[in-house]
Image (cartoon, rainbow, N blue to C red):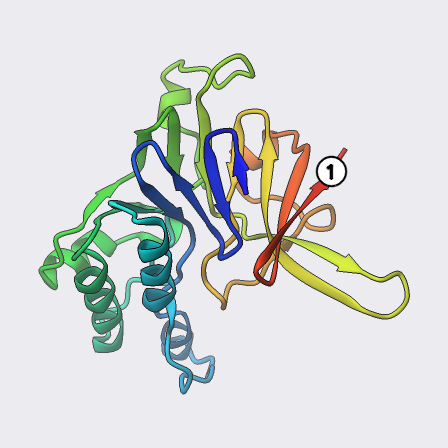
Amino acid sequence: MLVEGMLLDARRAVFLPGSRTLVVADLHLGYAWAKRVRGALLPVSAPDDTTARLMELQRDHGAKRIVVLGDVIHEAVALPVLEGLLREFCERLSIASEIVFCLGNHDRKLDRLMKGWKLPIACHRELELDSCCLLHGDTESLAAADGMAFRLDSPTRCLIGHEHPCIALDDGVSSRVRCPAFLFADDLLVLPAFSTWAAGCEVGRQPFLGPLARAARFHNAVACVGPRLLRLPLR
């Protein structure tokens, strides 16, 4: 789905054709292992398919850059399995694309871990690209804090993650399903979590976590319904 110069992909990604940049959010790599370290014995038998899913998107869009909008990992724990996941992610995807991490609240100490593991990925708090400000969304934008306004008459829009938005769809009788969703305000786009582990924040029923989403007036959602996108008005 093409929306104002951006291509929305039902596989929970945004593609910026101008710079051939693929944008995703909230990978939460190593989620099950981080939980097990804390005593929650989540199953780890299923392989993490994050890298494979991103490689498919990378190939289909011909992406020259991949930007992850924070929460790359679930927790910075020095586990060999997490190192393996990050190393596979970096080595396989960097063959065709530059990789950039915009660090989120779950990524504390990630930069230090990657340096220890000699993984040369650029890490930033936010990135300006194609008239967009890309960041995680757990804090205010640095650009906005410096007085840069994100107005309706400006082409600049913030792209964030952090919120894991989802929309509940039902038949009015007995069937109900929660679908990951993109959320649109005049100057803000919230991406769904790319992780299949991440629980969704149901729009209209649960509060937003970050200051950007809390301040926004969302007018449309675009739900990821299998391989299709469904636009839904929110006002």
Q: Which residue is mark 1?
A: 233
Side of 201 where 46 appears, left or right = left
**Image position, residue 63 (x, y; %):** 29, 47
Q: Residue at x 60, y 41 (%)?
A: 183
Determine if residue 146 is in view: yes
Q: Quadrant of residue 27?
A: bottom left
Side of 125 where 231 appears, left or right = right
Q: Amino acid at mark 1?
A: Pro
**Image position, residue 47 (x, y; %):** 37, 80
Above or below residue 210? Residue 26 is below
Which residue is most to the right? 173
CA neighbours of label 1 inside 10 A, class few (<14), some (14 to 19), many (20+): few
Q: Residue at x 45, y 41 (%)?
A: 138
Which residue is most to the bottom? 45
Q: Residue at x 32, y 35 (%)?
A: 126
**Image position, residue 165 (x, y; %):** 59, 50
Give SS at disc 1.
strand
Q: Nearer the viewer, residue 227 or 135?
A: 227
Q: Quadrant of residue 179?
A: bottom right
Side of 101 where 112 appears, left or right = left
**Image position, residue 33 (x, y; %):** 36, 76
Q: Nearer the viewer, residue 60 or 16?
A: 60
Q: Nearer the viewer, residue 231 or 30?
A: 231
Location of the C terminus (image quadrant): top right
